[in-house]
Image (cartoon, rainbow, N blue to C red):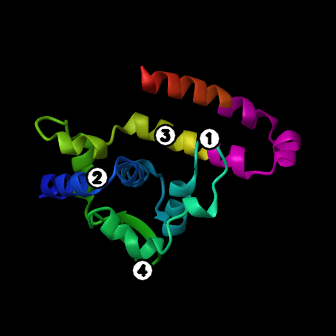
């Protein structure tokens, strides 16, 4: 069943949309606590090379989230987001691509997902925290962000 859903998503989505859905799956798989819909909306708006703008945010996020993710995730009554069943994330984290090439964009590798989460958090802090705060209270933030980007992006493109 998951193969069919993921294949359908792969056919109807652009690569950019697939990347956003994959980021949702990744964050749900590695989050240490439940994530709110607003937190995920923010995650998807974060850009790794510039500050986010209002155009980067998905409008009506809570109402489109389930459809966007092939109905494999849901917004719960407490406004947290989770997979519809524990087997969804198990499937995505324990699955090899194999003959189903359409699955590849959605498969989750835990260590990569944790590194990606770190990178997006650093980008958010780097671009969204006022520069004077970074300079006076968080001077290591820029150093860490630059070091992370150099290591992560060089390694991911090789």
Q: Which residue is mark 2?
A: 89
Out of 29 and 16, give the one closest to the viewer: 16
Q: Are marks 2 and 4 in contact (CB under 8 Å)?
A: no
Q: Earlier in the sequence, mark 2 or mark 4?
A: 4
Quarter of the figure with the N terminus: bottom left
Q: Are marks 1 and 4 in contact (CB under 8 Å)?
A: no
Distance (Cα) linking label 1 and label 4: 34 Å
Q: Earlier in the sequence, mark 4 or mark 3?
A: 4
**Disc 2 packing (10 Å; few <14; some 14–19; many ≥20):** many
Distance (Cα) linking label 3 and label 1: 14 Å
**Disc 3 packing (10 Å; few <14; some 14–19; many ≥20):** some
Mark nearer the viewer, 4 or 3: 3
81 inside magenta stretch: no
User: Which quadrant holds residue 147?
Assistant: top right
Distance (Cα) linking label 2 and label 3: 17 Å
Q: Which residue is mark 3?
A: 116
Q: Earlier in the sequence, mark 3 or mark 1?
A: 1
Secondary structure that dominates the magenta span: helix
Does dot 4 land on a helix, a strand or a loop? Answer: loop
Distance (Cα) linking label 4 and label 3: 28 Å
126 inside magenta stretch: yes
**Disc 1 packing (10 Å; few <14; some 14–19; many ≥20):** few
Q: Which residue is mark 4?
A: 77
Image spot of residue 47 (x, y percent): 58, 47
Distance (Cα) linking label 2 and label 1: 29 Å
Q: Which residue is mark 1?
A: 49
Residue at the image position 18 percent from the left and 52 percent from the top: 7
Does dot 1 land on a helix, a strand or a loop? Answer: loop
The answer to whether one can see residue 16 in this image is yes
Q: Earlier in the sequence, mark 2 or mark 3?
A: 2
């Amino acid at each position: 069943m998951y193969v069919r859903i993921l294949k359908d998503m792969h056919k109807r989505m652009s690569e950019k949309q697939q990347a956003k859905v994959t980021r949702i799956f990744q964050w749900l798989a590695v989050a240490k606590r439940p994530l709110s819909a607003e937190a995920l909306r923010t995650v998807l708006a974060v850009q790794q090379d510039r500050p986010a703008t209002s155009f980067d945010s998905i409008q009506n996020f809570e109402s489109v989230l389930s459809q966007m993710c092939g109905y494999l995730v849901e917004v719960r009554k407490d406004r947290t987001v989770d997979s519809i069943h524990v087997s969804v994330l198990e499937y995505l984290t324990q699955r090899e691509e194999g003959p189903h090439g359409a699955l590849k964009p959605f498969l989750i590798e835990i260590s990569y997902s944790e590194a990606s989460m770190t990178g997006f958090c650093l980008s958010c802090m780097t671009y969204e925290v006022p520069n004077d705060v970074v300079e006076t209270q968080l001077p290591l933030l820029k150093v860490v962000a630059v070091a992370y980007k150099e290591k992560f992006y060089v390694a991911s493109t090789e």
